[in-house]
Amino acid sequence: MTSHNDPPASPGLSQAIRDALEAKCSRLVLEVDGRQWTGRSFLAQANARCLQLLDAGLIPGDAVLVQSGRGGDFWIDVFAVWACGGVYAPIGDAISLDQAVRLVQPRFLLGASSTEEVPEGLNFLDGPPAGSAEIILPTIKPPAPDSLSTILFTSGSTGQPKGVRLSDGGLLANARATLQCLDLRPDDVLFAPIAFRFVSALSHFVTVMLSDATLAATEAPLLPNSLAASVESNGATCLGGSPIHARWLVEAEADAFTTLRWIMSSGDNLGSATIASLATLRPGLGIYTFYGLTELAGRFCWLAPQEQATHMGSVGRPIPGFSLVLVDDDNTPCLGNQIGEVIARGPGLMQGYCGDTQATDKAIGFGGFRTGDLGYLDDDGLLHLVGRKDDVFKVMGLKAHAMTIQDAVMASGLVEDAAVLPFEDDRIGTAPCVYLVEGPTKGYSKGAMMRHLRSALPNHMLPRKFIAVGAIPRTSSGKVDRTALRDLAQSLEES
């Protein structure tokens, strides 16, 4: 029984977003590829989708696949699924419909059209339908914080998709904690050029919807010039992207990106060289570094703009309410500056992988998620990442970290992009190989690069081979696609 002294129950994720949107009914809340929604028009269209889902027989707990590649209609569908008590899962180019059905066992598929044959028993609804003037969202019992609300697909290093089960309360807690970290003002427009199926895009959506700011987003592939044009056309004051976007800011003309107050980088590692260049070329621009995880429902660690000068290269501290511990190869907690695996803890911790108890048991330990990322804490307790466990290889009996080598290569300023893989050298066995994109104005030469690296790396980490490629394969979130990079390396060896 609830007493008068008990704190009020959390309204749940969809109700929290609804309350925020109702408070800014006449204001612009979302813009995607030229289409705009106020708080009222967003809720009206979501209301129409909710009624359609309920008429089709959706009950709380039903899984619903939502097709990406449909602009802002995608986000309306995501919110509508939550508002009906359903479980949202994105479907796009990274996973086939058959794979998604096998992992999630959904009852509904929402999209503009069905490009694949819809399996028997799966109810396909196009749309969403146009909204009406009256907004009467269904009254659904607020979900328990641990209720499943979202399943996101990730492949990790295996290349096989896994369904990450995230709770209603976990997503809400992560977004609220992220909001505490950001200087996000009512007149801000945050531009997010990230594929909507990624946890980073979902985090941007929930965080901005809970704020007084506006989200501008696109899934369209952008190049440096088109990114600058999109930032300008959307009137963006904040950019939520990846390290590649940060590097484009470094290389852009001085009169580009002038509307931005700050950028936040998540996804892959944001190198110290890029941060230093941004600080020099755009001294008034704030830089947030975020370290995020799908299995933690979004963000995990953050470094504020005012800390970049003194802790450059760090991913900072856990967001409010989250924590970490580092463990060594023997699962013993690390001391001091000792390198260990990052164990991520917090209310956003996943409920496991769909139908894969073995993978879940392997991933969960020490009260958190075993990230597979290696790092150490500096004297101020801030986290520095040095690579992944599966990116560590031994050279002449000594450990080499691919990320450390990659960062040193990028810090040279001689290449446009780079990634590192081990290869078998005839003389010393396993050794580092750098795959690099030269760039038309970088002035790369092997001699200049080696002179720089000899002053930056220990001898065993010095690359024994450099291979120029047209582009480093990356995921839509900006991370190096290591499976694709290994395939590229193999094809180059065979050619």
Image: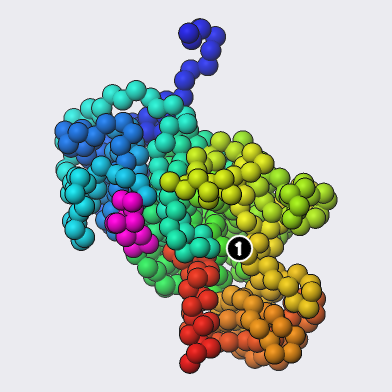
**Up-down relation of residue 334 to residue 219 (above or below):** above
- Asked if residue 100 lies left or right of residue 493, the reply is left
The three-letter code of the residue at mark 1 reads Asn
**Up-down relation of residue 445 to residue 163 (above or below):** below
**Up-down relation of residue 141 to residue 84 (above or below):** above
What residue is drawn where x is 20% and y is 61%?
A: 115
Question: Residue 268: image x %, image y %?
Answer: 56, 62
Colouring convention used in this rendered image of the protein = rainbow
For the residue pair 309 and 198, the one nearer the viewer reads as: 198
Which residue was labeled with disc 1? 269
For the residue pair 164 and 201, the one nearer the viewer reads as: 164
The answer to whether residue 183 shows anywhere in this view is no
The answer to whether residue 99 shows anywhere in this view is yes
In the image, is residue 96 part of the stretch drawn in magenta?
yes
What residue is drawn where x is 29% and y is 56%?
A: 97
In the image, is residue 348 part of the stretch drawn in magenta?
no
- Asked if residue 140 lies left or right of residue 259, the reply is left
Mark 1 burial class by Cα count in 10 Å: few <14, some 14-19, many 20+: many
- Asked if residue 125 lies left or right of residue 268, the reply is left
Question: Residue 375: image x %, image y %?
Answer: 71, 57
Q: Quadrant of residue 462?
A: bottom right
What residue is drawn where x is 48% and y is 8%?
A: 1
Q: Quadrant of residue 121?
A: top left
For the residue pair 141 and 266, the one nearer the viewer reads as: 141
Task: Look at the image and give the residue range highlighted in magenta.
Answer: 91-102
